[in-house]
Image (tube, helix red, strand yellow):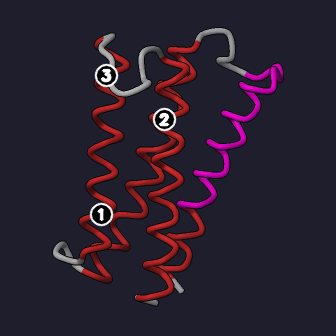
């Protein structure tokens, strides 16, 4: 039950982040929506919080050498490179500003959530 609560907490944080990004794109009047850099930083913080909860359960359940854990860590490294790219002003694929970095980060986060849900089915 404890492991399921970790997953629910991780998904809840992810849902809040997704709703926040949707609100930014939809033009809602929400905090931090006037500066793409600030919104990106908030999204990074939400993502790191969700990943911090999810990785603990994954390592505890499957171990470091599990292929699904390694795949999730690979996507995490991609996310870290996207953040690095955005903060340094470099270009990585289509990421060349904070808005495109936020979209790319969100896309990779969705892949990490799918991996996490698959792990919960394989390793209950």
> Which disc, if any, is residue 104?
2
Vertical arrangement, residue 116 with respect to residue 92, above or below = below
Tell me which segment is drawn in magenta. 10-30
Tell me where residue 22 sits by quadrant. top right
Q: Residue at x 58, y 51 (%)?
A: 14
Could you tell me what secondary structure mostly forms the magenta stretch? helix
> Which disc, if any, is residue 85?
3
Give the SS element for disc 3.
Answer: helix
Give the SS element for disc 2.
Answer: helix
Q: Percent position (x, y) of residue 70? A: 24, 65
Q: Residue at x 71, y 20 (%)?
A: 31
Q: Is residue 119 magenta?
A: no
Q: Percent position (x, y) of residue 49? A: 45, 48
- Count of all numbered marks drawn on residues in the image: 3
Q: Nearer the viewer, residue 14 or 107?
A: 107
Q: Return the residue at label 1.
A: 71
Vertical arrangement, residue 86 with respect to residue 74, above or below = above
What is the CA distance from the residue labelled 2 to the residue labelled 3? Answer: 11 Å
Q: Percent position (x, y) of residue 64? A: 18, 72
Q: Residue at x 68, y 17 (%)?
A: 33
Q: Residue at x 33, y 18 (%)?
A: 91
Q: Nearer the viewer, residue 94 or 44?
A: 94
């Amino acid at each position: 039950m404890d492991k399921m609560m970790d997953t629910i907490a991780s998904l809840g944080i992810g849902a809040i982040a997704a709703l926040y990004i949707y609100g930014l794109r939809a033009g809602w009047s929400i905090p931090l929506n006037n500066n793409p850099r600030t919104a990106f930083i908030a999204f990074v913080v939400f993502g790191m919080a969700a990943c911090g909860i999810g990785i603990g359960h994954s390592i505890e359940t499957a171990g470091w050498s599990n292929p699904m854990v390694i795949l999730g860590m690979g996507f995490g490294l991609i996310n870290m490179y996207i953040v690095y790219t955005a903060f340094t002003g470099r270009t990585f694929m289509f990421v060349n500003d904070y808005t495109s970095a936020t979209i790319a980060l969100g896309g990779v986060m969705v892949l990490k959530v799918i991996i996490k849900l698959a792990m919960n089915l394989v390793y209950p």
